[in-house]
Image (spheres, helix red, strand yellow):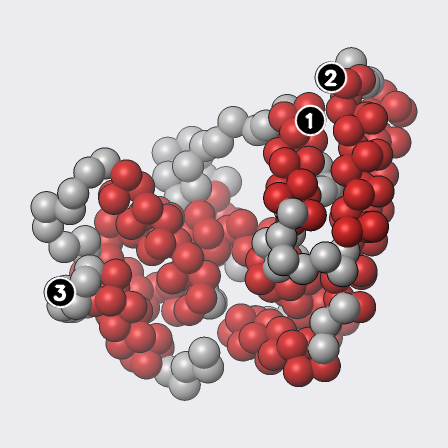
Amino acid sequence: MALESPEDYCREIEAYLCRKNDGHLVRIVGPAFEHVMAWAAKGVPFTIACAGIDRYFERYYAKGPRRRPVRIEFCEADVLDAFDEWRRAVGVPASPSEETASSGGSESTDEPHRRRASLPAHLERVIARLTTLRGGADRSLDDVLDGIVRELDARRADAKALRGDARQELMDRLRALDATLLDEVRARCGDAELSRLEADAATELAAFRDRMPAAVFEQSRRAAVDRLLRERRRLPTLAFD
């Protein structure tokens, strides 16, 4: 969605929050408005803000029946967390002010601390996701998925004990397999689908076009297309960094 101004951005966030609250209107005014305007100033894409809001609602519903409408302020930590993940995925650098804030000490709570998964656990999850894909309605990737699953299944038993060069070799191989999977999926996309992905990637990155050198922006654009392709085809990330 291409939004012409921060005010449009805020109105669309308000409308999305209304839909998530089953039609109950919670106005984004006062301090809440300032929060959302700050997201717009940071360049948080509308779709990524919505993904962060969705995360909060998922946890809220998991606790049982809702008792009151959710305010946008409650979603901010999830929105900023989703934005940080998106920014790392597509290679968009933090602004100088954000880098200063993030290095100012241990009191920052913008990004909740998460324990990193182990390499064996990562392989288990990837194999499970690929196996689910292999059992779906689209069988065009069966040969590719079969080959990757067999290779990862053979490597996971020894993954915990790998150290040094052997571990790095597996990490490099995972990155190569990840690129191969994306290439195979992209090759099976129609021109219309690829055009939509390109347009959506350009919309997500619009706020950063003037902030980045042309070569860096182009690299981020390609990464954004890959991220959207992965998301829409529900592909796991094979790389482990």
Q: Nearer the viewer, residue 15 or 22?
A: 22
Q: CA distance from mark 3 to mark 2?
A: 50 Å
Q: Amino acid at mark 2?
A: Lys
**Residue 47 locus on image (x, y percent):** 44, 66
In the displayed structure, 15 sits above or below 233; it is: below
CB under 8 Å between callouts 3 and 1?
no
| Labelled disc at residue 160 | 2
Give the quadrant of residue 199.
Answer: bottom right
The secondary structure type at the circle numbered 1 is: helix
**Residue 97 locus on image (x, y percent):** 48, 56
Q: Earlier in the sequence, mark 1 or mark 2?
A: 1
Q: Residues within 10 Å of mark 3 (few under 14, many from 20)?
A: some
CB under 8 Å between callouts 3 and 2?
no
Q: Earlier in the sequence, mark 3 or mark 2?
A: 3
CB under 8 Å between callouts 1 and 2?
yes
Q: Amino acid at mark 1?
A: Leu
Q: Residue furthest top?
A: 161
Circle 1 is placed at which residue position?
Answer: 119
Q: Residues within 10 Å of mark 1 (few under 14, many from 20)?
A: some
Circle 3 is placed at which residue position?
Answer: 24
Residue at horizontal 66 percent and vertical 82 percent from the top:
192
Q: Amino acid at mark 3?
A: His
Q: Nearer the viewer, residue 51 or 214?
A: 51
Q: Quadrant of the C terminus?
A: top right
**Residue 208 locus on image (x, y percent):** 57, 71
Q: Earlier in the sequence, mark 3 or mark 1?
A: 3
Left or right, residue 175 beside residue 85: right
Residue at horizontal 41 percent and vertical 85 percent from the top:
4
The secondary structure type at the circle numbered 3 is: loop
